[in-house]
Image (cartoon, rainbow, N blue to C red):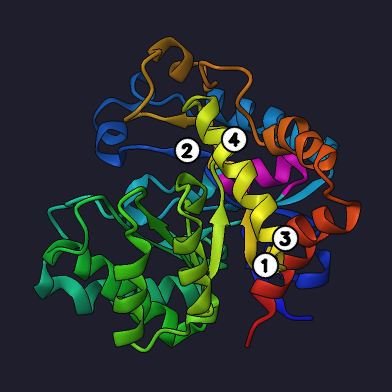
């Protein structure tokens, strides 16, 4: 058993319960929020919708949600604190940086950014006592260029200084997880404390095996993305293969759901109301839609306990 950080304070890992390892409440632009306020993002509407959806998740047995929103993807720690308090769902916040080409991500700024990230991991985010429980980094389909290397470097330095685990957003089908792992090795990261995310996006099972040989975990974390039935079937097939090969203990499950992502939504009325334009997308899709399919194919209660309870707990408990 180990103590980890949620937005409400320390939590012993045996209290995590069913855990979704990569979700979001809000992803978006702080610049646009500062410029246009509620005309851009109505916080109270989003909070109300988040609480409603989190309560539905709790009714399905989900106790904990890891919010994978890093610093430069619109992370709003006070929104996360309020959503956790009002819903009763435990929320783990992230530090770290996304792969977008932000103006401030210059090589000369790397040391300063790293120091600030370590400080919020140790003392709290944006003047609150809430500390991150995980770090987030990301590499897009173009691979690791100069600016992306800055964001990866800062996150991995914070990982080494604090011991926090890392979720790495990985672009597929480009197999970006491999160059990420090579970079993490060179930087002396602890690979067993890293999740290569979005691995359900590939149908290349040997690639998944190659990732796992490094000692990392893999995330099957986009089950409710509306990308056609073919993607869903591919994710399900690979879960069956992982079970057949005795590798389910290395898999972490999630939806990669958000209440609002203001740079991607096309229905702005839905954004302003704080709700996703597709009501079928929420934090319960895996439970409602995917688990019955897996159960029909032979998954047991023990398998689901491993995926949703044991694997997240084991991941956070690593020294």
Residue 119 location (% of width, % of height): 40, 76
Give how far apart the Cα atoms at labels 3 and 2 are: 37 Å
Say which element carries label 2.
strand
The single residue placed furthest to the right in the displayed view is 301
- Apparent side of residue 179 relative to residue 222 in the rendered image (left or right): left
Residue 294 location (% of width, % of height): 77, 41
Frontmost of labels 4 and 2 is 4
Name the residue: 35% across, 79% down: 184
For disc 2, the marked residue is 26
* Mark earlier in primary sequence (3, 2): 2
Whether the magenta-drawn stretch holds residue 160 is answered as: no
For disc 1, the marked residue is 247
Residue 57 location (% of width, % of height): 75, 37
Which numbered disc covers residue 316?
Answer: none
Say which element carries label 4.
helix
Say which element carries label 3.
helix
* Mark earlier in primary sequence (1, 4): 4
Q: Is residue 62 above or below residue 258?
A: below
Q: Nearest the camera: 136 or 115?
A: 136
The crowding category of the residue bearing disc 4, from other C-alpha atoms within 10 Å (few below 14, some 14 to 19, many at least 20), is few
Say which element carries label 1.
loop
């Amino acid at each position: 058993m180990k103590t980890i950080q949620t937005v409400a304070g320390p939590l012993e890992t045996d209290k995590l319960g069913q855990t979704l390892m990569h979700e979001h409440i809000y992803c978006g632009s702080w610049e646009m929020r500062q410029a246009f306020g509620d005309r851009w993002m109505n916080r109270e509407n989003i909070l109300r919708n988040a609480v409603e959806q989190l309560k539905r998740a709790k009714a399905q047995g989900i106790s904990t949600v890891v919010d994978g929103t890093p610093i430069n993807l619109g992370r709003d720690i006070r929104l996360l604190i309020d959503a956790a308090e009002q819903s009763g769902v435990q929320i783990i916040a992230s530090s770290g940086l996304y792969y977008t080409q932000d103006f401030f991500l210059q090589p000369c700024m790397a040391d300063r950014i790293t120091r600030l990230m370590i400080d919020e991991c140790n003392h709290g985010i944006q003047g609150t006592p809430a500390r991150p429980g995980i770090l987030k980094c990301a590499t897009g389909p173009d691979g690791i260029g100069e600016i992306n290397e800055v964001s990866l470097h800062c996150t991995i330095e914070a990982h080494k200084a604090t011991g926090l685990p890392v979720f790495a957003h990985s672009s597929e089908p480009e197999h970006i997880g491999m160059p990420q792992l090579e970079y993490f090795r060179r930087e002396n990261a602890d690979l067993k404390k890293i999740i290569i995310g979005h691995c359900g996006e590939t149908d290349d099972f040997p690639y998944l095996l190659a990732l796992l040989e490094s000692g990392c975990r893999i995330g099957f974390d986009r089950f409710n993305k509306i990308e056609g039935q073919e993607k869903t079937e591919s994710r399900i097939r690979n879960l069956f293969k992982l079970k057949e090969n005795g590798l389910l203990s290395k898999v972490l499950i999630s939806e990669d759901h958000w209440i609002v992502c203001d740079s991607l939504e096309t229905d702005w009325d839905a954004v302003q109301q704080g709700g996703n334009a597709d009501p079928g997308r929420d934090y319960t899709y895996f439970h409602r839609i995917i688990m019955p399919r897996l159960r029909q194919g032979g998954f047991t209660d023990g398998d689901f306990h491993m995926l949703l309870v044991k694997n997240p707990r084991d991941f956070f408990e690593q020294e």
